[in-house]
């Protein structure tokens, strides 16, 4: 698949006093704080290493939402190229501060990723969410996503 790797850069935009910008290494403390609100405590050192690694891949992007100089959300998206289906962009993670949910920040972050996907030549964006996170399922349905299937996720430690 040929996609526009040059379009994979996105600096910032301000909508409704929320700044959406590309994440930087200085954001790791706040990204970890937000992630812990969903039950994903992150090791700061490992998070920093992951964010730096993601930054070296032009088919990944991480954006943060900032209000009054404080992070109130983040989103990670990546290009998925599979043999059995057309390529797409997948949201790997989305968190909005629990005190700011319902204010449109999640929608803004997703729309930013949608623009990134279009600019890079993709016409589909996908997200996976745990079935027990009914609020997340409702949010994604509300902003235009539709359920395509249910599946099991299986891991094997190596």
Image (spheres, rainbow, N blue to C red):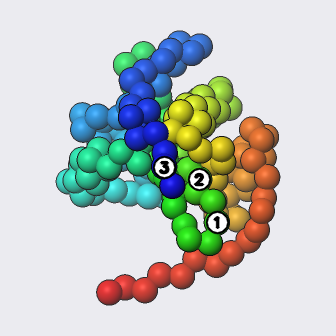
Residue drawn at x 56%, y 41% is: 121
Q: Are marks 2 and 1 in contact (CB under 8 Å)?
A: yes
On-image quarter of the C terminus: bottom left
Q: Identify the mark nearer the N-term, 3 or 1.
A: 3
Residue drawn at x 58%, y 77% is: 153
Number of marks present in the image shown: 3
Numbered disc 1: secondary structure: loop
Numbered mark located on residue 85 in the image: 1
Any part of residue 108 in sight: yes
**Residue named by callout 3:** 2
Q: 8 above or below 49?
A: above
Position of residue 5 measured from the top left corner of the image (x, y, whole percent): 40, 41
**Which of the two discs, 2 and 3, sits closer to the camera?**
3
The quadrant where residue 27 appears? top left
Position of residue 116 measured from the top left corner of the image (x, y, whole percent): 52, 35
Residue drawn at x 53%, y 46% is: 94
Position of residue 92 measured from the top left corner of the image (x, y, whole percent): 50, 54
Q: Identify the mark nearer the N-term, 2 or 3.
A: 3
Residue drawn at x 70%, y 65% is: 131
Numbered disc 3: secondary structure: loop
Numbered mark located on residue 88 in the image: 2
């Amino acid at each position: 698949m040929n996609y526009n790797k040059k379009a994979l850069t996105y600096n910032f935009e301000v909508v409704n006093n929320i700044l959406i910008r590309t994440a930087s290494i200085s954001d790791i403390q706040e990204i970890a704080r937000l992630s812990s609100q969903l039950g994903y405590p992150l090791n700061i050192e490992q998070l920093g290493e992951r964010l730096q690694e993601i930054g070296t891949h032009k088919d990944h992007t991480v954006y943060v939402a900032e209000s009054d100089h404080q992070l109130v959300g983040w989103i990670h998206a990546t290009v998925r190229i599979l043999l059995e289906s057309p390529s797409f962009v997948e949201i790997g993670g989305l968190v909005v501060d629990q005190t700011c949910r319902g204010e449109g920040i999640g929608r803004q972050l997703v729309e930013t990723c949608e623009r990134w996907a279009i600019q890079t030549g993709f016409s589909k964006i996908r997200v996976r969410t745990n079935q027990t996170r009914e609020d997340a399922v409702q949010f994604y349905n509300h902003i235009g996503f539709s359920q395509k299937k249910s599946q099991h996720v299986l891991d094997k430690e190596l």
